[in-house]
Image (cartoon, rainbow, N blue to C red):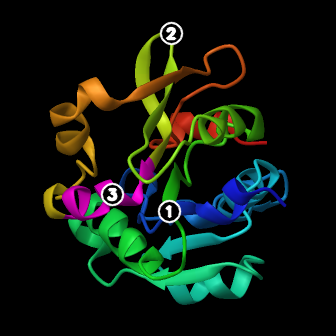
């Protein structure tokens, strides 16, 4: 195991309630016969993240029951209805003190982003000051990698559904963009129409 595998932890944000999907938690949407959250964890593992934390919110108990998340650290976000920012904060908080020096953050509802893209982003990790983002035709997207030096600043500015957007905008010059448009599709599963992306 290389040292970077210890240092870069995977963080899946899977707390959303799927408001525009009739209130079906995104973590539980079926993809290839299994809950979407299992797929998201599998992608991070395939990309080399040994430690994976999963932030749960909507119907967390049902997700725990139905999804095989063995080996993951499950983090409850009681404030999930306030938006993704609260999940990002909860997830980063859960990584403090684990020895992780960076968090590779993925969203549960982006199954078009596979291990190849995630591996590229992880490979750009250098140290705790790293800020790395996947890009699709030059446009910043997910996953993103936050070195531990940035966690407090991100947590302080992560509000509502904005997550790390404000922080990244303020530190644009420090971000390493990794083009992934050739190996991944960055769609979200937000509406009924998007469900066609699932298999």
Pick the front one: 40 or 145 = 145
What residue is shown at x 71% (from left), y 42% (from top)? 198
Q: Label 1 belongs to which residue?
A: 101
Of the residues under marks 1 and 2, which one precedes in the sequence?
1
Q: Which secondary structure, mark 1?
A: loop
Q: Residue at x 71, y 39 (%)?
A: 119
| Mark 3 or 2, closer to the camera | 3
Q: Find out whether residue 145 is within the magenta segment.
A: no
Pointer 3 with pointer 2, Cβ within 8 A: no
Task: Estimate the x, y position of residue 168 in percent, counting from the top left.
Answer: 26, 38
Secondary structure under tag 2 reads loop
Q: Residue furthest top?
A: 137
Residues packed near mark 1 inside 10 Å, few (<14), some (14 to 19) or many (20 plus): many
Q: Which class describes the residues within 10 Å of circle 2: few (<14), some (14-19), or many (20+)?
A: few
**How far apart are labels 1 and 2 at the CA level?**
28 Å
Q: Do the numbered discs 3 and 1 sit on residues whose CB atoms are within 8 Å? A: no
Name the front one of labels 1 and 2. Answer: 1
Q: Quadrant of the C terminus?
A: top right
Answer with the quarter of the image where residue 172 lies.
Answer: top left
| Local secondary structure at mark 3 | helix
Residue 165 drawn at (x, y percent): 24, 41
- 134 left or right, relative to 181: left
For the residues labelled 3 and 1, the Cα–Cα distance comes to 8 Å
Check disc 3 and report the residue beneath it.
149
């Amino acid at each position: 195991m290389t040292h970077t595998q210890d240092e870069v932890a995977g963080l899946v944000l899977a707390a959303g309630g799927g408001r525009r999907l009739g209130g079906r938690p995104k973590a539980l949407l079926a993809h290839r016969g299994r809950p979407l959250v299992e797929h998201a964890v599998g992608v991070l593992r395939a990309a080399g993240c040994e430690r994976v934390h999963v932030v749960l919110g909507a119907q967390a108990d049902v997700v725990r029951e139905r999804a095989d998340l063995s080996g993951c650290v499950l983090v409850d976000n009681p404030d999930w209805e306030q938006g993704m920012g609260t999940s990002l904060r909860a997830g980063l908080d859960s990584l403090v003190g684990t020895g992780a020096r960076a968090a590779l953050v993925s969203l549960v509802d982006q199954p078009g982003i596979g291990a190849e893209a995630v591996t590229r982003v992880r490979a750009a990790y250098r140290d705790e000051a790293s800020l790395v983002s996947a890009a699709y035709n030059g446009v910043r997207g997910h996953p993103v990698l936050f070195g531990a030096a940035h966690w407090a600043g991100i947590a302080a500015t992560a509000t509502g559904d904005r997550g790390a957007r404000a922080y990244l905008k303020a530190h644009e010059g420090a971000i390493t963009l990794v083009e992934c448009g050739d190996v991944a599709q960055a769609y979200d599963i937000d509406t009924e129409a998007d469900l066609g992306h699932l298999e």
